[in-house]
Amino acid sequence: MDNRILVTSILYHAEGNHSASSRIESLAAILQAVEESSQAPDVLIFPAGFLKFHDEKEKKDLISGVQGMIKIDTCVCLGIDSYDGRHQLGILLSKKGIKAMGRKYFPTDWDTKAGMIKATDYLAREEGYERVFTLKTKRIYIAVCNDIKGITALNLEQPQPRVDVVVDLIHGFNKKGGGSSPSYFARTMANSAQKWQCSVIGSAAFFDRDIPSNWPAGIKLKSYQKDMRKWNYENNLLEPLTNNSTKLASLELKTYKL
């Protein structure tokens, strides 16, 4: 029995139109394509803040709407933020409902200035849900954007959860010179993969900039690689399945078997 899972990262190219309706349309198009495919992934990973809400009612309605789109056994993991940035969540949904949820715990300077309400720690429950979930035999941890940097900042006294995969829901990358770069996040993902000895799969929006052809949405390191100063893209062991690297309008999908 093959206990490996298929994880698909969604890289979203946002050119001009960043509206909520356009994102819902993109999500619906991907789920439709997945339903019609011969081999659906076990989980689809969307960026942080992919959906946004004003209040709790709108949040619940958005979650219910996404759940209603899922017709098969594929799960959807996505970021959902409040418009003011105070609430930043990662959530895993199946057609039966919420399976896992995590709140961002490692704020950026901007988050702190905006008054972001962070999780009490990196393993805290959110609304009663764990942020680690299991698919087949794989244990998967939800990181919300800068949380991936938080993993590298954990000290040795803080227990390391037993996980096989970290999914990092990244908010996105702006034009060059504006905020963290894709290569910076790739290195941070690699550092986290090395620290927890697991794979890391990232999903991100690319705002008014091209998606780099060589950006590694999936990262796995050699177990003996210790000196991360020498890490580069060529040291990455993960490659997307060539027959599952699909392009839709404004989207690039990369699927990994883990």
Image (tube, grey):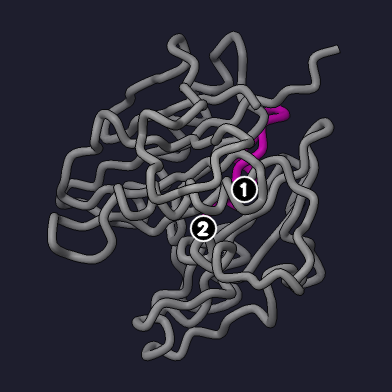
Q: Nearer the viewer, residue 68 or 33?
A: 33
At mark 2, the secondary structure is: strand
- x then y, percent, for residue 37: 55, 13
Write down the residue under mark 1: 166
- What's under tag 1, amino acid-wise? Val
Quarter of the image where the C terminus is located:
top right
Residue 110, image quadrant: bottom left
Residue 125 among magenta residues: no
Q: Which residue was labeled with disc 2?
A: 79
Residue span colored magenta: 64-78
Compared to 229, does 106 lie above or below? below
Q: Is 147 left or right of 103, judged from the image as shown?
A: left
- The foreground one among 223 and 12 is 223
- Disc nearest the viewer among 2 and 1: 1
Query: Amino acid under label 2?
Result: Gly
* Residue at the spot 58% in from the left edge and 58% down from the top edge: 143
Q: Position of residue 69 (x, y in %)?
A: 59, 39
Identify the image quadrant of residue 235: top left
Secondary structure beneath dot 1 equals: strand
